Amino acid sequence: MNLTTSMMGLRLAHPFVAGASPLGRDLDSCKRLEDGGAAAIVLPSLFEEQVTLAIEGRIRHKDPYDERSAASLRHFPCEHDYAFTPDQYAEHVARVRAAVAVPVLGSLNGTTSESWLTFSRLIEQAGAHAIELNLYEVVADPRMSGAALEHQIVQLAADLHEFLTIPIAIKLSPFFASIGNVVLQIDRAGASAAVLFNRFYQPDIDIEELHTVVDARLSTSDELLLRLRWLAILHGRVKLSLVASGGIATPEDGVKAILAGADAVQVASALLRHGPGYLATLRDGLDAWMQRKNFSTVNEFRGRLSLRDVADPSAFERAHYLRALQSWKLETPAVRQ
Ligand SMILES: Cc1cc2nc3c(=O)[nH]c(=O)nc-3n(C[C@H](O)[C@H](O)[C@H](O)COP(=O)(O)O)c2cc1C
């Protein structure tokens, strides 16, 4: 079977990429990711707050030692809580790059198009094959419009494109009124890939202790369906590569993402759960499925279940929604009583 694929111009031996996670923090575990079968490795992020704290001594334009900023900044990690300083991050990129043969992507995580972004050049100079920009932001200010946020995101993509010669992937949130339009805009701004989607860490509430509980829960396959929808809608309608991220827990999930239109598939939770060797399980599972279905290349079935040839995808989605509701049968005894 020929499992090769192309993601943002990078040739990959197969579609399964190690997504940004703590597994990319040290050289040893990066080697384990490669040995485990990763087609490429996305390193964990360098955060905007880290860079502005190291360079300007400020977070979100505020001095953490100023009493007036204390309330809004007290929840941020301290400088030494991060795995790397910004300079160490660039060194890490260079060391990983030298130690593994697969493509290595640096990752930036932030929300503004400001000076910290110039740091991306150091990551490029350190040898990263590409950069992924994670735009994690919960817009809690009700006065901020969706249009203003989208403008900011597109500007970030355009600025990064101007700074760098290596390809840029943008990891997006699914929470836009028109996701397709945002992807189209970042495509036009010069991004080479859209990573669909970011996962939002949602605090729970402990009703005994009366406090909020914040933790990074690992995903399950349930989260994949949202990704499948947008991969299917966007496949064939944008120039950039489409990368699935979120809820790839089994080889079958990877097959589904490619059938929907993914060029590559990132995995984080499944690797934290089963270890780097799970990448080989994913790859071999894809290989076995292709043999069973008589496909000899990934291109033969990529996007086979996308909406590329559907004239009006919105009508298609609406029709399926109506059919799903109408097909519900009131069969469980409790409901019939
Ligand atoms: C513990 C943990 C750490 C993560 N760190 C990062 C990070 O540094 N940068 C980033 O862009 N995404 C990070 N992610 C998000 C993953 O890269 C991925 O987008 C998300 O978990 C969805 O994929 P999954 O369902 O395969 O886990 C992290 C996820 C987990 C669980």
Image (cartoon, rainbow, N blue to C red):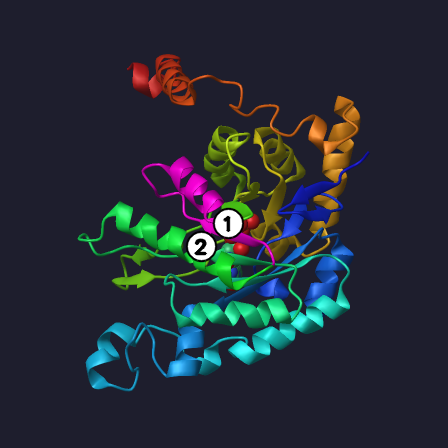
- The residue under label 1 is 190
Magenta span contains residue 85: no
Q: Which disc number belongs to residue 58?
A: none
Q: Dot 2: what SS?
A: helix
Circle 1: residue type: Gly
Q: Position of residue 266 (x, y in %)?
A: 60, 48
Q: Which residues are magenta?
A: 166-190
Vertical order, 329 against 177 (above or below):
above
- The residue under label 2 is 158
Q: Position of residue 291 (x, y in %)?
A: 80, 28
Cβ atoms at labels 2 and 1 below 8 Å apart: yes
| Quarter where residue 290 is shown | top right
Q: How many marks?
A: 2
Q: Dot 1: what SS?
A: loop
From the viewer's side, name the closer residue of 157 and 201: 157
From the viewer's side, name the closer residue of 3 and 252: 3
Circle 2: residue type: Ala
Which residue: 57% across, 74% down?
Answer: 89
Q: Residues within 10 Å of mark 1 (few under 14, many from 20)?
A: some
Q: Position of residue 98 (x, y in %)?
A: 75, 69
Which residue: 52% across, 34% down?
Answer: 231
| Quarter where residue 126 is shown | bottom right
From the viewer's side, name the closer residue of 284 and 305: 305
| Quarter where residue 25 is shown | bottom right
* Residue 44 as seen in the image, left or right of residue 201: right
Q: Quadrant of the C terminus?
A: top left
